[in-house]
Each structure stands twice: as structure tokens, then as C-alpha cells.
């Protein structure tokens, strides 16, 4: 067996359930705005850049630095940016979030 470097091991962890402490959060019909901005866009997991004070994201415990890994059970690694944007506007919408701390 070949010994993998830490970088290679990190690259292998693509399954959101294998990542650190993922949390499922749902924005229901009564949520008008998510109240968070992102660093970058899919394809690929994206980090939360900022949360609006008093917004939905802050109210459910999302913090800057957290990573969105899926939306409505669709992995962001292979999602088009336009699809991500459309899913974020629908309600209810479910996020799988890897918390930074």
C-alpha cells in the first residue's frame, strides 16, 4: 500500500458525510432572505463570507468561515453556479453546512 501525503488524503474526502461535523439546516417558506454571502461560487464547496445581523443564517448558527457542501441534497462539487443561485431562492431549501469550529 502506498502512503498518501496529507494533501492527497484531503483531496480524497469528497463525501460531505465524511467531512467534519456537517449540519443540516432548512430555510422554510417564511424565510424571505437567507442573510449570508459567499466566497466564490460552485462548482466546488463554498465558504460563507458574511452573515446579516438578525438574518436567517445567523439565527440558525451559520457563521463566516462555515462551508456549504450541498443544497437540497445536491453536492456543490458538480453543481453549476446558476443552479446554486436558483436553489438558494426556492423555499423550503435545505443546506448541508460544515461548521468552521
Image (spheres, rainbow, N blue to C red):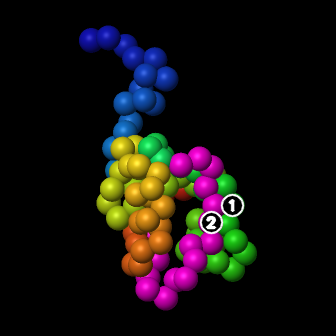
Q: Crowdedness of circle 1 by 10 Å Cα count: few (<14), some, many (20+)?
A: some
Residue displayed at 46% across by 43% down: 44
Question: Which residue was labeled with disc 1?
Answer: 50
Would residue 37 appear left or right of 72 to someone viewing this image?
right
Q: Is residue 42 above or below residue 24?
A: above
Residue 62 on image: x %, y %: 58, 65
Question: Which residue was labeled with disc 2?
Answer: 36
Q: Is residue 88 above or below residue 16?
A: below
Residue 63 on image: x %, y %: 63, 62
Residue displayed at 36% across by 44% down: 78
Depth check, front residue: 63 or 90: 90
Magenta residue span: 18-41
* Contact? badges 1 and 2 (CB < 8 Å): yes
Q: Quadrant of residue 57?
A: bottom right
Could you tell which of marks 1 and 2 lies nearer the N-terminus?
2
Would residue 88 appear left or right of 63 to someone viewing this image?
left
Amino acid at each position: 500500500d502506498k502512503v498518501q501525503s496529507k494533501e492527497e488524503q484531503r483531496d480524497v474526502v469528497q463525501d460531505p458525510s465524511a467531512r467534519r461535523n456537517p449540519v443540516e439546516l432548512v430555510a422554510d417558506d417564511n424565510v424571505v432572505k437567507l442573510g449570508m454571502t459567499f466566497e466564490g461560487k460552485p462548482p466546488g464547496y463554498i465558504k460563507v463570507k458574511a452573515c446579516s445581523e438578525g438574518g436567517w443564517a445567523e439565527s440558525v448558527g451559520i457563521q463566516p468561515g462555515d462551508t456549504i457542501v450541498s443544497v437540497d441534497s445536491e453536492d456543490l462539487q458538480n453543481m453549476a453556479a446558476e443552479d446554486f443561485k436558483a436553489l438558494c431562492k426556492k423555499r423550503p431549501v435545505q443546506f448541508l453546512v460544515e461548521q468552521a469550529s
